[in-house]
Amino acid sequence: MNAERSIDIVIVGAGFAGMYALYKMRRLGFDVQVYEAGGGVGGTWYWNRYPGARCDVNSLEYSYQFSDDLQQEWNWSEKYSSQPEILDYANHVADRFDLRDSIQFNTRIASLQFDESSKLWLGETEQGEYFFAHYCIMATGCLSKHNIPDFKGLENYSGELLHTGQWPHGEVNFSGKSVGIIGTGSSAIQSIPIIAQQARKLTVFQRTASFSIPAHNAAMDKAYEREIKANYAAFREQNAQRYAALNNKPNPASALEMSESDRETIYEQRWLEGGLPFLASFNDLGINATANATAADFVHRKIKQIVTDPKVAAMLCPETVMGCKRLCVDTNYYATFNQDNVELVDVNASAIESITKTGLKTTNTEYKFDSLILATGFDAMTGALLSIDIKGPSNQTLKDHWRDGPTNFLGLSINGFPNLFMITGPGSPSVLANMIVAIEQHVDFIADLLVSMRGANQMRVEASLEAELSWVKTVNRIADQTLYPRGCKSWYSGSNIPGKPRVFMPYLGYPSYVDKCNKIAAEGYRGFDFA
């Protein structure tokens, strides 16, 4: 089978990871081609266009740092940037650095097969185009394979069916409509207040309540922006030394060493500041269940103060450990349930039996909707990779290799799959760190490795089996010291996907991860096998 192209590096995905990988590798003299399933750059911000879609990381942090000129020239309009503005930024980056001519859009990769005779990856697109590549870099994203549960009768629904992760590019108007939304994770929490303003009736179906902290979003403080830009490098370096590479102002004190009054004061301050830093109120919220319960109790009381119906308030109070599921950030989420046109349904008490032609049926009630929204999340971390038929030199599939969970080294390389790299894969800080910071660190590590190989005339690299097994134990050992794996069922562990191995996937602690990577590189890339 003849390939149409032979390329040094193929990058799969043109989100923030794929764009920076393209920029970096091209500057190092590699011939690079990017394949992107969507019609434009931006990755998750290209697809997730639901009402209220917004980043939960401060705009001055959720941005590239590889170019100081870019950092200085781009101005964000809000503290937490909206999806349209982030997509504008992605497009600006693509244009400013002339990236588009190396990206083939509307092209989904169907398969990748390592060809033993040529020692190259043979790739095939869904359109039937073939290519050979020496290296493949998977920039497929952690939250890019949307999840549609196997609802009985879903194919029969005749109304407007939407998924928050695959939202239409045109305007969706809910005015005067009866709308149902299934799910109360981050996407739902952002979209529900806006949809409720339009819809005649909004019915929310909840399986598990999520903790959410008010964003207190506002226009960008220009004085603060000038202050950060005056010494951006130091700001970035300081953040890189923090647990999640975020300016979350960690409090070194224990929640249990405080008096109840002092603890309450700190929680109140964090609540008024808003956002993800709430989880850094004390240093033991992630490792001590009693300490964590003080934070959960505070948020429960806030919910009961905001929501006027005690039964609804109780339903909205999560029973899980705070932080073991993604902590959400909202604008008027809890207050929305005070509106007369909003109803909350607990599917644990009234399970969804089927989707009907006109709506859905629970064990207690049948509902009719003009629009039905699935805010049912993603097959996270591994879903996008496993949707591609990837086969190594022994013809072993990645799906088989990961049958019991995603084994790998550093979240970057997989034993038995040479010259294949992941960006922010399972086993790396990824979703529990500032994603763009983690992306740049991963790409830089891969780039340095490839340059080192080029200088040594090495043509093949993969994680050793020993390093892979050891790394999985390291990730698990660190996670097991925290409340995350056992605090609840979450997509961090694949619990939202039937049949998926229950393995806690992220590496906890960005600075210690970077230290390990730097040490491995300094020791001649210990843990990698070269040929």
Image (spheres, grey):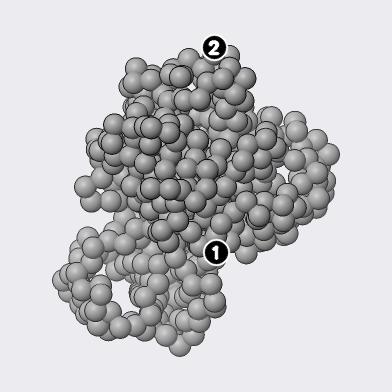
Q: Residue at x 59, y 24 (%)?
A: 454
- Answer above or below: position of 494 versus 354: above
Residue designated by label 1: 39
Total marks in image: 2
Compute the Cα span from label 1 to label 2. 42 Å
- Dividing the picture into quarters, in which one does residue 68 lie? top right
Q: Residue at x 65, y 55 (%)?
A: 100
Residue designated by label 2: 523
- Answer above or below: position of 224 versus 90: above
- Crowd rating for badge 2 (residues with CA inside 10 Å; few <14, some 14–19, many 20+): few
Residue type, numbered disc 1: Gly
User: Does residue 281 appear in this view?
Assistant: no
Q: Is residue 406 left or right of residue 266?
A: left
Residue in the foreground of this view, choosing between 190 and 519:
519
Q: Position of residue 239 (x, y in %)?
A: 64, 33
Q: Position of residue 407 (x, y in %)?
A: 34, 31
Mark earlier in primary sequence (1, 2): 1
- Answer above or below: position of 172 versus 123: below
Q: Position of residue 350 (x, y in %)?
A: 20, 67
User: Does residue 163 appear in this view?
Assistant: yes
Q: Position of residue 198 (x, y in %)?
A: 50, 80
* SS category of the residue bearing label 1: loop
Mark 1 touches mark 2? (CB < 8 Å): no
Q: Residue at x 46, y 31 (%)?
A: 419
Residue furthest to the front: 2
Q: Is residue 352 left or right of residue 183?
A: left
